Image (cartoon, coloured by chain):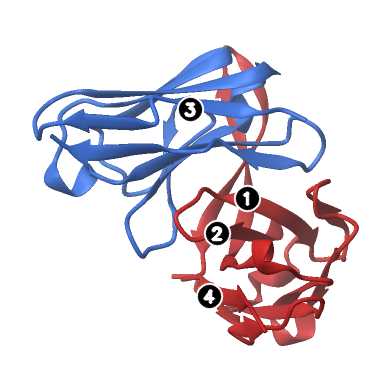
Amino acid sequence: QLQLQESGPGLVKPSETLSLTCTVSDDSIGSSAYYWAWIRQPPGKGLEWIGSISYSGSAFYNSSLESRVTISIDTSRNQFSLKLNSVTAADTAIYYCARRTEKMITLGGLIGWGYFFDYWGQGTLVTVSS
Amino acid sequence: EIVLTQSPGTLSLSPGERATLSCRASQSLNSRYLAWYQQKSGQAPRLLIFGASSRATGIPDRFSGSGSGTDFTLTISRLEPEDFAVYYCQQYGSSPYMCSFGQGTKLEIK
């Protein structure tokens, strides 16, 4: 059973950089079949996709966060990381890492790829406060 | 960017009843890109449905998904006590490699 584990500081000061790492329990991080994602959830609110990265380092970001976000990957260590700079109290949230899987799906006689998050970390709360 | 709007915001039902949750997309969406997740308090989300109608591994058959175009539905045929949670729809792939979630529907015990 694949496991993902987030790690990093639970408290970050305003205007500083939030840095988190997700450790993947097996070497599927090096597979072209998956992307690796960060998703966050402010306390009591809904889910927000931050961005995703492939094993080769191709990254895609939520346009609302793109100017402040960097996601990187280190397949030799089975890890991928999130950096979010210039944080404010609005960045206080539970941060999840997750695996995005692609699967061939047949619908209405047509075949194509579907994408979804099938494994999630337990989440880590990051609070932005001085 | 596709916006997903879920309704109702809160649904109050009793165990044994049927639950119908709606997810509407701001523009037509390929059904292969639509998934549903369940989130219980203090836990990470769990994948229920992918490709609009395919159940994920280990998901009971009382959960079903349907829909196409802009309107998608998650149905729970007979509610069990453990089904009371928050449910999110999500799309991934409508614009290459981009993802968004609906705001969630809270299913609570009446």
Instruction: Name the element at disc 1.
Output: strand
Q: Are marks 2 and 1 in contact (CB under 8 Å)?
A: yes
What color is chain B drawn in? blue
Which residue is located at x 62 percent, y 84 percent?
A: A11
What residue would you read off at disc 1? A48
Which one is nearer the viewer's eye here, B13 or B74? B13
Q: Which chain is red?
A: A
Which one is nearer the viewer's eye here, A52 or B87? B87
The answer to whether tags 2 and 4 share a subunit is yes
Q: CA distance from mark 3 to mark 1?
A: 15 Å
- Give the percent coordinates (x, y) of residue A79: 70, 79
Q: CA distance from mark 4 to mark 3?
A: 26 Å
Q: CA distance from mark 4 to mark 1?
A: 15 Å
Quarter of the N terminus of chain A within the rendering = bottom left
**Mark 2 chain:** A
Q: Amino acid under label 1?
A: Glu
